Image: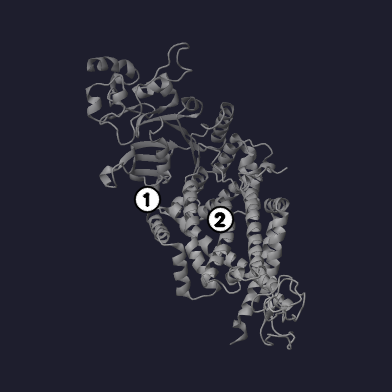
């Protein structure tokens, strides 16, 4: 295996690209009055939710950068030649051999002394892994699923929806055939079939979720395009001699922007939740909160009850989705020109 | 005077109610011909559904689907626009022939600054830099009477009033110095005082720049203020085309007479306002022969049987009515309406 193809390097590279992209967006936002005003207004409305999102994002970034070497070779369960991310390194070798309650000094069953007494704020799971560590690892998976799937589904929906609405005719018929076909199949079965066909893994889960979730937004964008197409400014653009693609990119898509934002946010939280469902069915993504919840299913019937595993995964999921929805709501208020206030 | 735009026997059709067969198509514009000279204002007048907007859109080849131009010619400086390629047509639209719409509220993209929208219109047709285009827009805004043009450049449409938006639209239409401006009911959606301002603006622009204006309206008051010549349309056909003064002083077609008699300002104060009985038949339900015949108080046998022939009079005047003798020869010209009276009485 050549070093350039190793997954951890790809992940590092992707993180770098993400950061560069982010810096570019920040620069654009700072230069434009409209966008910087929108950003300020967004910050004023949803400080807490944005902070929560920031924390999740930071954790995901720290978990995306990995490198080799520099690990204590004598620690339990540590492979000296494997790449470890920044988050991994914090918790490296901190595992126990079985359940431990939060901040416990001894094992939950049996009462044998722990290797690191009092060092697990959220306890450990059945094979002694730190639950806080696993909950933190889940952030990257959740953000990856939400973002990657939206990046697949939204352009797909826009391409078909705007195309069908704008050009109509045969293409519209074709898109409607596609939509009806997809809508006539039970979503979950199609999802499972797609994942089985493509093989398990993060990318195939994202593609499968994307393919099954673009239909709703496609209908919405088609309907909205049908409305926009007949508006005078689109007709005026046509009279001015603007090309069809020019009209779509300059006049139709910007006027769909608020729909795109709202859909992205609603989809994002919905997708993270769908992944939890898939994990519960045993075909989710490795290391997700859904898998933690799935693994904790039987622990709730133990005596005494093991609650910290499901509580950690559930709260992490809940907080992320609440924050995303709150921010999305505010973004729509800020960006929609119909709710935009006059500049003072 | 050279002919800038010649429309010959234009026919535009839409699918009828029953299916998609070619026989079922309805001719919404049915054999309309007229010319537009340089620097002239021609008003296209008619009730709703008479086909005046579709006539203008046909000339630009922008008939909304599933409608299409079936036959005829639209010659712009001698070239038939209906035979040009899509790319050639796009270079003419906006650059040589521009159009403004009835509803200024929706005619500007709400998410773009108005200045940028006009800048883009200029850059679409001319290879000028943004800064140069912006300077031109500033001058244009001043020319169309927008106060504080510098500030308005960066305004969004929702920050402007209806009158200002319509001025921006006019500025955008004029930004590439077109030879023809098609104004589709440019003042219908505006307050009366703003209407007067916009009409004054259009008149000044036409005088200063020599832009020909094809004015589409149903408001004869606007026609009287602005037009040089008037083409009256009814049910997809031209019924009368005449210089404005002649049309208002001596309308020949019964429909034109009815329209003029319906204007409150011209009617006797206190008297009951004239109305034309009935409504315009909808497209596809047009009668044979003269289409106005069922509502015409002066109809006689030939009206419902055959299409009226074209009658020409001096000054390029054209009328389509069985009451009007086709040739301009003899005593018929001039005192036509007096002459047709006995004829019409005989018909009853």
Secondary structure of residue under mark 1: helix
Q: CA distance from mark 2 to mark 1?
A: 44 Å
In terms of image quadrants, where is residue A106?
Answer: bottom right
Q: Residue at x 56, y 50 (%)?
A: A255
> Left of B226 or right of it: where is B136?
right
Seen at 63% across and 46% down, the residue is B115
Please provide percent x and percent y for residue B341. Answer: 29, 15
Instruction: Pick whichever, B56 or B160, lies toward us.
Output: B160
**Which part of the image, by quadrant, shows the C terminus of chain B?**
top left
Q: Which mark is residue B11?
A: none
Relative to residue B273, is residue A184 depicted above or below?
A: below
Residue B126 appears in view: no
> Which quadrant is the N terminus of chain B positioned in?
top left
The crowding category of the residue bearing disc 1, from other C-alpha atoms within 10 Å (few below 14, some 14 to 19, many at least 20), is few
Q: Secondary structure at mark 2?
A: helix
Which colour style is shown? one colour
Residue bearing the label numbered 1: B83
- Residue B166, compared with residue B135, is above or below; it is above
Mark carried by residue A263: 2
Expressed as whole percent of the image width and height from the top left, the position of residue A86 reads 71, 76
A60 left or right of A208 in image: right
Q: Nearer the viewer, residue B268 or A68?
A: A68
- Tell us which disc is closer to us: 2 or 1: 2
Question: In the drawing, does residue A223 fall left or right of residue B290?
Answer: right
């Amino acid at each position: 295996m050549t070093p350039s193809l190793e997954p951890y390097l790809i992940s590092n590279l992707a993180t770098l690209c993400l950061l560069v992209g982010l810096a570019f967006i920040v620069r654009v936002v700072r230069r434009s009055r409209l966008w910087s005003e929108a950003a300020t207004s967004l910050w004023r409305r949803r400080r807490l939710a944005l902070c929560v999102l920031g924390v999740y994002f930071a954790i995901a970034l720290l978990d995306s950068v990995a490198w080799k070497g520099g690990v204590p070779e004598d620690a339990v369960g540590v492979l000296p030649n494997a790449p470890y991310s920044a988050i991994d390194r914090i918790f490296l070798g901190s595992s126990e051999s079985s359940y431990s309650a939060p901040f416990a000094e001894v094992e939950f069953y049996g009462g044998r002394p722990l290797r690191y007494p009092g060092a697990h704020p959220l306890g450990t799971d059945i094979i002694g892994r730190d639950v806080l560590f696993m909950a933190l690892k889940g952030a990257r998976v959740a953000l990856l699923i939400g973002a990657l799937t939206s990046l697949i589904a939204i352009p797909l929906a826009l391409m078909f929806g705007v195309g069908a609405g704008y050009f109509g005719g045969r293409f519209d018929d074709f898109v409607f055939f596609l939509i009806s076909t997809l809508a006539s199949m039970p979503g979950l079965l199609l999802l499972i079939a797609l994942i089985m066909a493509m093989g398990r893994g993060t990318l195939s889960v994202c593609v499968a979720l994307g393919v099954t979730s673009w239909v709703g937004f496609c209908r919405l964008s088609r309907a909205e395009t049908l409305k926009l197409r007949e508006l005078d400014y689109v007709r005026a653009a046509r009279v001015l001699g603007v090309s069809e693609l020019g009209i779509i990119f300059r006049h139709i898509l910007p006027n769909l922007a608020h729909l795109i934002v709202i859909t992205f946010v609603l989809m994002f939280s919905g997708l993270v939740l769908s992944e939890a469902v898939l994990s519960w069915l045993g075909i989710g993504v490795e290391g997700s909160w859904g898998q933690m919840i799935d693994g904790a299913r039987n622990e709730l019937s133990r005596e005494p009850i093991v609650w910290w595993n499901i509580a950690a995964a559930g709260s992490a999921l809940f907080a992320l989705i609440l924050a995303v929805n709150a921010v999305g709501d505010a973004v729509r208020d800020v960006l929609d020109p119909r709710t935009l206030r006059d500049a003072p | 005077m050279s002919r800038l735009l010649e429309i010959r026997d234009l026919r535009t059709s839409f699918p009828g109610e029953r299916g998609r067969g070619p026989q079922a198509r309805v001719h919404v514009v049915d054999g309309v011909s007229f010319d537009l000279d340089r620097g002239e204002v021609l008003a296209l007048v008619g009730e709703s559904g008479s086909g005046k907007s579709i006539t203008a859109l046909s000339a630009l080849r922008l008939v909304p689907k599933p409608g299409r131009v079936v036959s005829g010619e639209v010659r712009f400086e001698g070239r038939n626009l209906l035979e040009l390629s899509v790319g050639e047509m796009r270079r003419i639209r906006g650059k040589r022939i521009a159009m403004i719409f009835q509803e200024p509220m929706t005619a500007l993209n709400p998410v773009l600054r108005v200045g940028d929208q006009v800048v883009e219109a200029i850059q679409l047709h001319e290879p000028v830099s943004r800064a140069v285009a912006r300077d031109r827009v500033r001058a244009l805004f001043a020319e169309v009477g927008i106060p504080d043009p510098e500030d308005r450049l960066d305004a969004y449409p929702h920050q402007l009033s209806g009158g200002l938006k319509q001025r921006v639209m006019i500025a955008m239409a004029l930004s590439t110095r077109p030879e023809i401006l098609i104004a589709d009911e440019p003042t219908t959606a505006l307050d009366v005082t703003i209407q007067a301002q916009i009409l004054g603006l259009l008149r000044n622009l036409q005088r200063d720049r020599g832009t020909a204006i094809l004015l589409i309206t149903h408001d004869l008051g606007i026609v009287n203020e602005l037009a040089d010549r008037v083409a009256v349309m009814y049910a997809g056909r031209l019924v009368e085309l005449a210089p404005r003064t002649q049309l208002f002083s001596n309308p020949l077609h019964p429909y034109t007479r009815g329209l003029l008699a319906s204007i409150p300002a011209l009617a006797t104060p206190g008297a009951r306002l004239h109305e034309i009985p009935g409504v315009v038949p909808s497209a596809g339900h047009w009668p044979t022969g003269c289409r106005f015949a069922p509502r015409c108080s002066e109809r006689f046998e030939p009206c419902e049987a055959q299409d009226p022939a074209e009658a020409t009079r001096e000054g390029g005047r054209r009328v389509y009515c069985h009451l009007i003798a086709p040739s301009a020869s003899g005593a018929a010209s001039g005192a036509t309406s007096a002459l047709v009276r006995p004829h019409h009485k005989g018909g009853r």
